Amino acid sequence: MQLDEFGKGINQEEGILYTGSWDKTVKAWNVSDTKCIDSFVAHEDNINSILVNQEDGCLFTSSSDGCVKIWRKSFGENSHNLTTTLSIHNSPVNTLALSSSPNSFYLYSGSSDGSINFWEKDRVSGRYIHGGYLPDHRFSVLCLVAIEKLVFSGSEDTTIRVWRRDEETNFHECLAVLKGHRGPVRTLAACLEMEKVAMGILVYSASLDRTLKVWRVKVFPGEQPNATNAEESATTTVCYDHKMSSSTRECEMSPVLSPAWVEKKLQDKHLP
């Protein structure tokens, strides 16, 4: 069982928890009595990410088969029907994120080729129209989180990128690259801090380097975010080590990305 992030696989209105598995199935659970109310084969390969649109209850799944699928629960029943298949990817889709505003709705997906694809939902037809892709990560995109017009992407290349979407053109500008982790960034979460002049956001990142970092990013209208590429840009750094006692101490920072590993990854990317 794998949930992309806590809460993303829950239909809050109907009290249903969705789980996706490497056995290619999705299961729907009634939260009140923990009973499985539906189980169906959703993809042809591992399911890597799952989330729910709280506005209409639609379920989104992504898989190593390179597809993103959209499901809807049948009215008055527990069964689920496939409504849309988005198959623009040529590599495993690892993560999903949704971004909504009063006038727009976007779906983002991150894949193992380092790209982030996005779709805009047509408010009239309900169709998802492919808007393009964001190509700057060197290795796999492992996690995504969207808040307001900003999108944060965490990658196997150890970086976190901050993107800003232009509502009129759909152009996405990379505002900053947060560097501080020494291993793949596996999970991201973000929350909005309300400020008068700038939009302040707290970003939480967890990495395979065994650290949790908290970043404060401030975005001023029409300006770059106030965050540097140095590790010191993290507001708080918490090291986690399963061997640690209750006392706090620095954990050993052993780089996950050795030079030989990086060289092999770059060679693999250039193979035909």
Image (tube, rainbow, N blue to C red):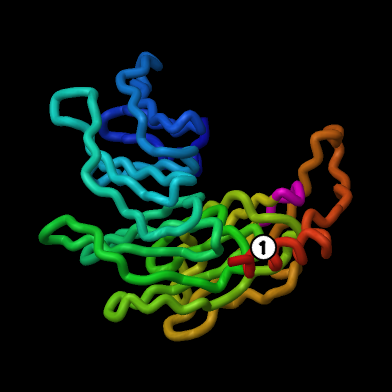
Q: Which span of residues is magenta-colored?
A: 208-213
Name the quadrant containing residue 80. Answer: top left
Residue drawn where x is 42% and y is 46% of the image: 62
**Vertical relation: 118 (above or below) 136:** above
**Vertical relation: 229 (above or below) 10:** below
Q: State the image coordinates of residue 243 (x, y, percent, origin top left).
A: 85, 34
- Quadrant of the image containing the C terminus: bottom right
Please name whichever residue, 223 or 161, is drawn nearer the observer in this view of the structure.
Answer: 161
Residue reaching furthest to the left: 124
Please name whichever residue, 249 or 178, is drawn nearer the observer in this view of the structure.
Answer: 178
Residue reaching furthest to the front: 272
Q: Can the viewer see residue 163?
A: yes
Q: State the image coordinates of residue 76 (x, y, percent, origin top left).
A: 14, 25
Amino acid on which the number 1 mark rests in the picture: Asp
Q: Badge 1 is on which residue? A: 268
Residue drawn where x is 42% and y is 58% of the image: 89
Q: Can the viewer see residue 190?
A: no
What number of labels is visible?
A: 1
Locate residue 82 relative to residue 185 in the image: left or right: left
Residue reaching furthest to the bottom: 222
Secondary structure of residue under mark 1: helix
Locate residue 45 relative to residue 52 in the image: left or right: right
Answer whether residue 95 is magenta in the image: no
Locate residue 88 relative to residue 256 in the image: left or right: left
Answer whether residue 212 is magenta in the image: yes
Name the quadrant containing residue 88. Answer: bottom left
**Vertical relation: 108 (above or below) 58:** below
Q: State the image coordinates of residue 40 (x, y, percent, origin top left).
A: 33, 27
